[in-house]
Amino acid sequence: MKRRKATAYHAPDPATLAPKATGRELVLRSSTIGVLPIINRFLDRCRLREILQRHLPAEDRRNRVPTATAILLMVRNILVSREPLYGIGQWAASFVPELLDLHEDQLKSLNDDRVGRALDRLFDADFPALLMDITRHVVGEFELDLSELHNDSTTVRFFGDYEECEQPQSRRGKLTAAIRHGHSKDHRPDLKQLLYILTLTNDGGVPVYFTTDDGDKNDDQTHIATWNVLRQLTGRADFLYIADCKLASADNLAHISQQGGRFITVLPKNRSEPRAMHATLLDQPDSLRWVLLYEVHDEDGVLRQRYQTLREEQLTADGYRLLWIHSMSKAISDDAGRMKALQRTMDDLGKLRIRLQSPRSRMRQYARVAKEVDAIFERRGTRELLHVDIIEQEQVTPTRGQTRQTQSRSSTKKKYTCEIKPRFDLSWHVDAEQLERARRADGVFPLITNDRQMTAEEVLRAYKRQPVIEKRFSQFKSDFHVAPVYLKEISRIESLLCIYFMALLLQTLIERELRGAMAEADLESLPLYPEGRPCRRPTTRRVIDVMESLSRHRLTKSDDETEDLYTDPTPIQRQLMKLLGNSPASYGRSR
């Protein structure tokens, strides 16, 4: 290659690309730049290549594509477009190879076999040590606050039998999780699954640790092991650990408290304290004294949310603080859910009534009709709110008997009989008194904590930050399309989930840095939506879509002389580059 010039790209005149009279052949090749320079900058800041090389087994010299390069290629693929593993090579060929840490001659080696072997080598690494190393560096590089951590789990579903993976197995010295049927959080109980456990910081919702477990494992059995790892990661025990009601088992809470930790969680409804409070709310609501915690108003000053708590704090049977919270929006939601369940109950009763009135109905016994009604109540949970009457009726059906002839052959007399069968009908009405009584308990939920210093408002606000983890799970499953998984080897599956964790980490760091840069620049929004509509809380997905049009166009002449032409960035693309620490002048020019 003799000479390369880099200039800003303007749409060339087709006449200038045509072969000249001298016979020199011109070849124009376009490659996508997109968001890769931004992703690469964050990969460098996280030192993922360096950390991977430190934890991966020794490299096989026959590999034309190093394992760390293949792994980071999968991370970029998941972030940008989520192509299937067998299509990684074709996907990579559409981008500037230098931005993927590749050479042109390496692209043909990116087949599904190379990707699979990279997953195998990642499995041979020590996952906890690898993740600990990554997180500790990221915490220092991005100055993450680890004083408050949020934990939750989701399920990753699989199509297929996976009979060989139904039991934990030792693979190359490591015990794998079991792919089994369990409580499906995706509402697919017909599919086997793995449990995916994730912990985030409150500071930007950045993932700091993940692990997998058996598909039928209950969440309450995972918290002690997770908390122990987080204690090792943070180097302290007094961080605030927040999780859902599965944390509230006696063993979990005792372990955290005895080790000097702090927690906030919701008390399950099956405990004695919530049952007693529910009875009080229904029968003696005037005996409770509520005080205001805080309110939330929209831009127009309209009240959207109000939180209250009982004036007197209570204690659980284990001696932890018990805070009863009343939420205005939850009360509205609870009542709407009840009315929806009522309507569905009445719809089901209407369908049952049509079946009872059908001439072909076989429900001729009272007990069978009552069983059908009970099944509807059991399914909808509205037994106390509706009164249903089963009305028994008699259906008289005339039947023709034998024909009797008189002496005159032209005269006959027909003998008729009657058949009497029971038939049933339904009538129902809503019990208005019970409906109003049930509304007294709407919007109330119990929080427990062992922290004696936080106010009730601080406890509530900390718990209200828990839904950020649901946002990460949504990105995990919608943006990244993690499920369903079609890999068959459990070791490769666990490695792939580790790569998804790295991708989720990078995605959240890009969002956190962009929003922080907007705050420093006093920018309330960016025009990232179609038609330039403002976006107040931009996501990495929006950044990827906006930067997609950037490309490099390489013009090669017959004497191997090349000229690189680059797409001119739009104003919003330039703004994003600057906010995320990239120079528009050199964007995509080199790695």
Image (spheres, rainbow, N blue to C red):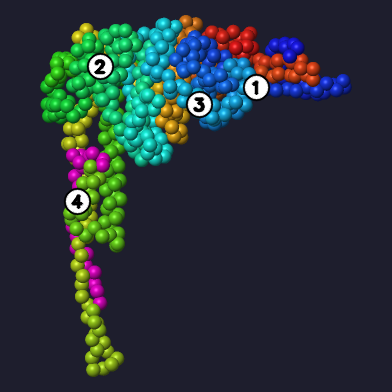
Give the mark, 2 or 4, whose residue is nearer the N terminus: 2
Of helix, strand and loop, which one carries label 2?
strand
User: How far apart are the alpha carbons under marks 4 and 1?
Assistant: 74 Å
Identity, as a three-letter code, of the amino acid under mark 1: Asp
Q: Position of residue 65 (x, y in %)?
A: 57, 21
Looking at the rendered image, the disc whose residue lies closer to the viewer, 2 or 4, is 2
Q: Is residue 572 above or below residue 379?
A: above
Quadrant in the picture for residue 150: top left
Q: Which residue is mark 2?
A: 264
* Magenta part of the chain: 379-400
CB contact under 8 Å: marks 2 and 1 = no
Of helix, strand and loop, which one carries label 1?
helix
Q: Which residue is mark 4?
A: 370
Q: Position of residue 565 (x, y in %)?
A: 70, 16
User: How far apart are the alpha carbons under marks 4 and 3?
Assistant: 61 Å
Give the mark, 2 or 1, whose residue is nearer the N terminus: 1
Q: Position of residue 499 (x, y in %)?
A: 46, 22
Give the mark, 3 or 2, whose residue is nearer the N terminus: 3
- For the point 53% across and 15% down, the residue is 39
Q: Which residue is mark 3?
A: 117
Identity, as a three-letter code, of the amino acid under mark 3: Arg
Looking at the rendered image, the disc whose residue lies closer to the viewer, 4 or 1, is 1
